[in-house]
Image (cartoon, rainbow, N blue to C red):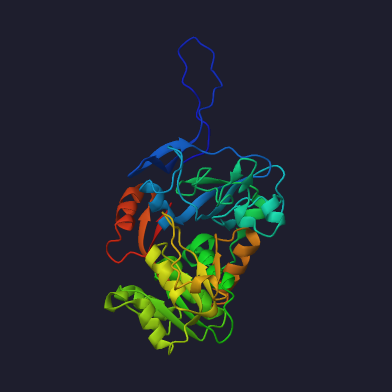
Amino acid sequence: MSLAPERASRLPGTAVPRRCQVAKMKAAVFAEVGRIVLEDKPVPDIGPLDALIRITTTTICGTDVHILKGEYPVARGLTIGHEPVGIIEKLGSAVSGFREGQRVIAGAITPSGHSAACLCGCSSQDGAGTRHGFKPMGGWRFGNTIDGAQAEYLRVPDAMTNLAPVPDGLSDEQVLMCPDIMSTGFSGAERGEVRIGDTVAVFAQGPIGLCATAGAKLMGATRIIAVESIPARQEMARRLGADEVVDFTEGDPAEQILELTGGRGVDVAIEALGRQETFEGALRVLRPGGTLSSLGVYSGDLRIPLGAFAAGLGDHKIVTTLCPGGKERMRRLMEVVAAERVDLRPLVTHRFTLDDIEAAYDLFAHQRDGVLKVAIRN
């Protein structure tokens, strides 16, 4: 796609009009519940603090499937996607410290850096508090409140806060997980305050849970118990740091984990699926004073069972996490990749071009062919 303007044709004997047509790009947009389609849209304009990046690789997230199914509402016509890897095409007039042609990523969460939430140290919730009440996930803008990354071009707001240069020698697929699932999964271990010598249970080994397993290993957990029934995901969990795998189809996973730990329970349980049964199971396996770190996106009300919660007297801690964003977070994650402390490339099981993104959604949404993550390339 070219950004060059096109000249209008002229009739004989008339002056040549200098009217420029708006440059177009391909983008995956939310059309209606059950339909995300590829359409032509105008290339985004940018303001002084923004950057325009040309997307080279992106991916589809489970949250995008929630949008597809109508479980998370967004505006019709919105470009979906929040995991961009690309090249700076144009910089806003007030942006410094970057150059056009530079390879960059931006986090799924794009904080401004100066909101009340940012200044309180919780940049993921940037924009969440308003005079009309609390709106969670205020820092998640791509594919939520502004056009997202499943397109040829993307406007990155507050570019100096959110763009992170990709180190030389790292491929797109090596850093593709940094904007969301790596940041989210690692934060499950971080918010759970995993310590050296801890026993950790991770409920569900989808992409987020697998990254939580890897994060717990990096933070010093010496026994990681993964809950998963799909053999390929069980094997991937072991590759990323799980010491034991509990198959929930073979019995109550909480009972299996308590048996494995001799009744002690785990120091930290990470819930990475977003269902009542996994949340409750994670609560049931905690030792006294243990921490439940919740990463799941829940589509209904949760119930906290009296016994598992020890009637509120068990000194338990329940913490929730939204993917940390911003350029410093992205820099740190890419340093982990560059240092070869973790390799998440095997999570990319399928590859599509942007032209075939509707087929990619069909595969990913129906979880066919052992899919974990798909790479969408321009």
**Residue most extreme to the top:** 13
- Where does residue 291 sit, x and y in percent of width and height? 54, 74
- Where does residue 250 sit, x and y in percent of width and height? 27, 78
- Give the vertical position of 148 relative to 211 (above or below): above
Q: Is residue 238 visible?
A: yes
- Give the vertical position of 71 relative to 188 (above or below): above
Q: Residue at x 49, y 40 (%)?
A: 2
In the image, 191 versus 350, the foreground residue is 191
Q: Residue at x 54, y 76 (%)?
A: 314
In the image, 125 versus 343, the foreground residue is 125
- Where does residue 61 sit, x and y in percent of width and height? 43, 57
Picture mark count: 0
**Would you say 40 lies left or right of 48 here?**
left
Q: Quadrant of residue 133?
A: top right
Q: Is residue 163 visible?
A: no
Q: Residue at x 36, y 60 (%)?
A: 351
**Residue most extreme to the bottom:** 262
In the image, 110 versus 153, the foreground residue is 110
In the image, 198 versus 35, the foreground residue is 198
Q: Quadrant of residue 296?
A: bottom left
**Would you say 236 lies left or right of 15 here?**
left
- Where does residue 38 sit, x and y in percent of width and height? 37, 42
**Would you say 138 lies left or right of 231 here?**
right
